[in-house]
Image: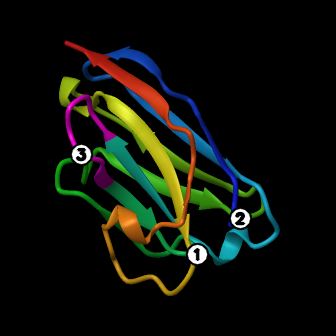
């Protein structure tokens, strides 16, 4: 498995932007499908975005499509989540996740084998 550490969360106002980073350990980072999920208080963890090993294929939840962008830098073992036009409903703990295997647009958290500790994003109105 790969170890993941998120950073970049914080308190912002509606309409602001944030960029989350997720640093991964291990030599095989480039082989992993990477994803971002989030969990708001009292709610289940939900899919945000995924990206394939090369960064060419990305997939987003309907609630963030057009506002968020996932990317990766395999040379730096890092995946990013650029979040623009933030809304109060984006408030959640954001988790980075990794899994092996082929990319298949899955949005199920259970298939991801490695998780970071999460970073809090709070958007005030």
From the viewer's perspective, tell me whether residue 64 is left or right of residue 3.
left
Q: Are the two marked residues, 3 and 2, in contact with CB atoms closer than 8 angstroms?
A: no
- Please state which of the two labelled residues, at mark 3 or mark 1, is closer to the viewer: 3
From the viewer's perspective, tell me whether residue 25 is left or right of residue 9.
right
Q: From the viewer's perspective, is residue 5 above or below residue 7?
A: below
The disc, 1 or 2, on the residue closer to the chain's N-terminal end is: 1
The disc, 3 or 2, on the residue closer to the chain's N-terminal end is: 3
What residue did someone put label 2 on? 74
- At label 3, counting other C-alpha atoms closer than 10 Å, the crowd grade (few under 14, some 14-19, many 20 or more) is few
Distance from Cα at disc 3 to Cα at disc 2:
30 Å
Secondary structure under the numbered disc 3 in the rendered image: loop
Main structural element of the magenta stretch: helix, strand or loop? loop
Secondary structure under the numbered disc 1 in the rendered image: loop
Q: Position of residue 67 (x, y in %)?
A: 29, 44
User: Residue 85's quadrant in the figure?
Assistant: top left
* The label number, if any, that marks residue 53 in the structure image: 1
Q: Are the two marked residues, 1 and 2, in contact with CB atoms closer than 8 angstroms?
A: yes
What residue did someone put label 3 on? 44
Q: From the viewer's perspective, is residue 91 above or below residue 108?
A: above
Q: Residue at x 36, y 62 (%)?
A: 109
Q: Residue at x 51, y 57 (%)?
A: 97
Q: Which residues are magenta?
A: 39-47
Distance from Cα at disc 1 to Cα at disc 2:
8 Å
Locate the C terminus by quadrant.
Answer: top left
Q: Is residue 37 magenta?
A: no
User: Residue 26's quadrant in the figure?
Assistant: bottom right
* The label number, if any, that marks residue 62 in the structure image: none
């Amino acid at each position: 498995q790969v170890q993941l550490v998120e950073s970049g969360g914080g308190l912002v106002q509606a309409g602001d932007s944030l960029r989350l980073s997720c640093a991964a350990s291990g030599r095989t980072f480039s082989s992993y499908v990477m994803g971002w999920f989030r969990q708001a208080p009292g709610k289940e963890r939900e899919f945000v975005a995924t990206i394939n090993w090369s960064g060419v294929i990305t997939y987003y939840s309907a609630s963030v499509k057009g506002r968020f962008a996932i990317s990766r830098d395999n040379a730096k073992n890092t995946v990013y989540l650029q979040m623009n036009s933030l809304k109060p409903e984006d408030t959640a703990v954001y988790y980075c996740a990794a899994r092996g295997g082929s990319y298949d647009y899955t949005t199920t958290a259970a298939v991801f084998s490695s998780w970071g500790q999460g970073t809090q994003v709070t958007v005030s109105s």
